[in-house]
Image: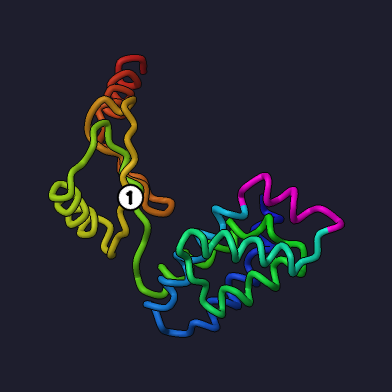
């Protein structure tokens, strides 16, 4: 997938440069791009876009129509980016463009995404407490997202970028197993 990442980088960087230092607009555009990336991932849309009988304007109109039907108003910058992507036959790169743009926006605002895996659901107050502790631990503001993974047995596993904090029961059992078999 390095090729898709290479294709996506200039598009993501160009959109990011157009936003400048406006982190609020960057967050809004990131949300819009993520929604469009979900649409672009559809096999039916990919088949439609790949058809030689379909013009790029028609593909844009279909995507914009579906976005409007989902109450998603596209910013002019996102619309222009979408047109450029479609005109250049790069619709398959849209999810990667959205991911790279999101990473650029996060980096500029000093925020990182955190995936918190838990064996059990975490309510809002617990999540706030866990997030505050994790922000102190990682030394930066975090955007937490919770995933349920019953195989953890208990505790949590946190992934922030390339850093992992695993305090799950499963990890502790693995550590004990390694110690006993060593």
Residue 155 to residue 69: above or below: above
Residue 99 in sight: no
Q: Residue at x 56, y 57 (%)?
A: 37
Pointer 1 residue: 145
Q: Nearer the viewer, residue 12 or 167?
A: 12
Percent from the top left, x then y, of residue 34?
50, 60
Q: Which residues are magenta?
A: 41-53
Residue 45: in magenta span: yes
From this viewpoint, which residue is outermost toward the top?
181
Secondary structure, magenta segment, majority class: helix
Residue displayed at 35% across by 21% down: 178
Query: 179 and 134: which one is in front?
Result: 134
Where on the picture, by quarter, is residue 175?
top left
Horizontally, residue 82 falls left or right of residue 129, namely right
Residue appearing at x 56%, y 73% in the figure: 78
159 in magenta? no
Can residue 4 be seen from the camera position used here?
yes
Q: Please name the residue shown 64% across and 69% down the image.
A: 82
Query: Where is residue 11 shown, x and y percent of the image?
Result: 63, 71
Task: State the SS at label 1.
Answer: strand
Report crowding for label 1: few under 14, some 14 to 19, many 20 or more residues within 10 A (C-alpha). few
């Amino acid at each position: 997938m390095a090729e898709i990442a290479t294709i996506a980088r200039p598009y993501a960087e160009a959109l990011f440069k157009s936003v400048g230092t406006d982190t609020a607009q960057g967050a809004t555009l990131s949300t819009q791009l993520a929604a469009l990336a979900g649409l672009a991932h559809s096999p039916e849309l990919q088949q439609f876009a790949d058809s030689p009988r379909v013009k790029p304007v028609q593909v844009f109109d279909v995507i914009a129509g579906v976005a409007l039907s989902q109450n998603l108003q596209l910013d002019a910058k996102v619309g222009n980016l979408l047109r450029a992507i479609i005109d250049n036959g790069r619709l398959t790169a849209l999810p990667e463009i959205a991911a790279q743009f999101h990473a650029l926006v996060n980096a500029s605002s000093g925020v990182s995404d955190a995936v918190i895996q838990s064996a059990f659901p975490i309510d809002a107050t617990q999540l706030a407490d866990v997030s505050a502790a994790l922000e102190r631990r990682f030394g930066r503001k975090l955007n937490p997202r919770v995933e349920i993974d019953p195989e953890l047995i208990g505790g949590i596993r946190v992934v922030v970028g390339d850093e992992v904090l695993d305090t799950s029961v499963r990890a502790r059992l693995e550590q004990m197993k390694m110690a006993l078999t060593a």
